[in-house]
Image (cartoon, helix red, strand yellow):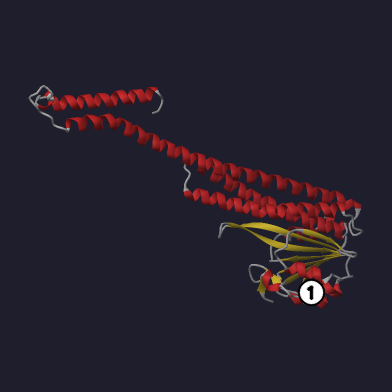
Amino acid sequence: MLNVRKSRKSGMLPGSLVYIGDEQAQNTKITMCGYDEKDIVITDIHTAEEAITKKDQFSVLWLDIAGLSAAKIISQIASGYGVHPLTVEDILNTEQLPKLDIFDHYVFVILRVYFYDEKINALKSDQIGIILGNNFIITVQERNSLLFDGIKERLKNQQSVIRKKNADYLIHALLDASVDSYYQVLESIGDMIDEVEQRVMANPTPATVKQIHALKRSIIFLRKSVWPLRETINGLYHRISPLIQDTTLLYLKDVYDHTVQVIDTVETYRDLLSGMMDVYISSINNKINEIMKVLTIFSTIFIPLTFISSLYGMNFNTTMGLNMPELNWRYGYVFILAIMLCVVVVMLLYFKRKKWL
């Protein structure tokens, strides 16, 4: 399966299995978690037939698919669980924004999770598709990650609430883990904003501007997905599906509240960065004004000195009463230097009194 852009997909039939993303898809790994209140089985799945035959063997079955290289296997599994081909197409299109589709026998959610790549100093994202059926959940991750490892560990505990609930509670746990990952990203961005803010106040440089712009791009990138995510979770909470029990709605409302908090933080960081740019411009202008003030003061001081020196540079020495007597005076040179020094001192005292210095 080739990694092509949307323009390369033009003219293809709806439901065509084409991976759309910035990088080649990772190898597909399928993990099966089948459980009820008493027992749990966690194992790797290698074929679509194996995944399909396990469908009705557990009270709740969770298939976690990481990597999109095996599009054919993903399509076969989806078909075996009654998933529409258009849903599979959306899963393989990794440039989707968060959205919610409610079908007769399953619910489909797409969301994005973010992480900060320190190697390239930029924010990156992965797409996650979640399919909720009557007694099963299928998650399809763009790349293999540790995002849901905590949930798998909780499932191993027989006293865990997830083991006592249906599949709709598991989708709450998955959504909650995804939204919580935003807090980690925002914490990293917040630390960088504090660092840049100190540089702006202390010693702003052109490199500081680049950092501010990079952070603004990250916030815009994050904001682009957070708002649709809020509407997705809100739609899941209000667009009642028979697959979601009333007892789970309260937990979904809690995830929605977390999403609102994430949005508030994103908007706050966005305002901070905008204000930081204004502070940077003001700091640079103040620097320029200070430099211009010093240059102006020096220029103002040297104007009368230049006048005096240029006046005596004319070297008039006549016998008609218009001569410069200092030209022939023994101490004339020292006298003129003393006058020039007095002019400098008087002007500096005047500038200081006016608080220009």
Q: Secondary structure at mark 1?
A: helix
| Image position of 60 (left or right of 202) | right
From the image, tell me which residue sits under label 1. Answer: 75
Total marks in image? 1
Quadrant location of the N terminus in the rendered image: bottom right
| Image position of 71 (left or right of 272) | right
> In terms of depth relative to the viewer, which is nearer, 107 or 57?
107
> In terms of depth relative to the viewer, which is nearer, 82 or 16?
16
| Image position of 351 (left or right of 341) | right
Residue 27, can we see it?
A: no
**Which residue does the image show at 84% across and 55% down from the upper left?**
236
Q: Given the image, on which type of amino acid does mark 1 rest? A: Ser
Where residue 122 sits, quadrant-wise, is: bottom right
The x and y percentages for residue 210 are 52, 52
Q: Classify 102 as above or below 73.
A: above
The x and y percentages for residue 163 are 85, 58
Q: Classify 247 as above or below 58.
A: above
The x and y percentages for residue 315 are 13, 31
Where residue 33 sits, quadrant-wise, is: bottom right
